[in-house]
Image (cartoon, rainbow, N blue to C red):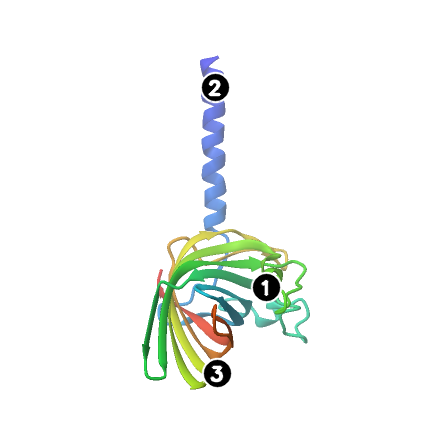
Amino acid sequence: MKRHLTFWLIVAILSLLLTQAFAEHQPIVGLAAPGQKAIEFIGRSDQDANVVIHFGYLTRISDLGEGALFSDPTIRSEATARFTFFSTTEITSRHELGNIITTAAPGKLTIFFNRTPGGNFNDPESFTAGVPIATYTLRYHNTLNVQTENEGIVSGAADLLQQSAQSFTLGGEKRRLGHVGLRQRIEVTGQGTRTQIDPLQAFFLLGGHIINTGR
């Protein structure tokens, strides 16, 4: 009996090691050299009091052909985007000086792979319809340059630390986006619009990129 259990224990350990070895040899995309762009994206942020959600789609991933990012390469929009993202943050710091407002917030970010794309900016949850392939913790710092009573120019940055990386199949080949422990930095710019004063509600249209800061 003891020999039988030992045999199956060895089989289980070998199976785990082989699985890990296979995962480690899957092609990794989005692993640009430190200081180089790994990902480009476009999206929107919706603020309700201190809670801000961020959602959109990836327009470029290093080491992956741009046409592969969309189910129809001739129509490059949220409706055809294979890679989408969704993030929730909560503002913990806010400061004002003249027409400048700065905020900071920790949160989490998830990137999804969509076999059947169908994003819609009128439905934030549609950007979570795919399979999660990468998760991150983050802290962002945002600067709003108020131009009129309810409009402003926004720029922001966030430090990312990757927490998970699940394989996905594209073009018959398994790949992974980044790896656990990867450090990156988001940089964005865009336009902010306040739609309600109390409680504060606003939305931001953003474009940006992610830079690898360390492997």
Q: Is mark 3 on a helix, strand or loop?
A: strand
Residue drawn at (49%, 46%), measured in percent from left and top? 22
Left or right position of 212 against 205: left
Q: Nearer the viewer, residue 191 or 214?
A: 191
Upstream in sequence: badge 3 or badge 1: 1
Q: Is mark 2 on a helix, strand or loop?
A: helix
Q: What element carries label 1?
A: helix
Upstream in sequence: badge 3 or badge 2: 2
Residue drawn at (60%, 60%), measured in percent from left and top? 125
The amino acid beneath tag 3 is Glu
Left or right position of 113 against 160: right
Calculate the distance from the C-alpha at mark 1 to the C-alpha at mark 2: 50 Å
The amino acid beneath tag 1 is Pro
Upstream in sequence: badge 1 or badge 2: 2
Residue bearing mark 3: 151
Residue 92 x/y as whole percent: 36, 62
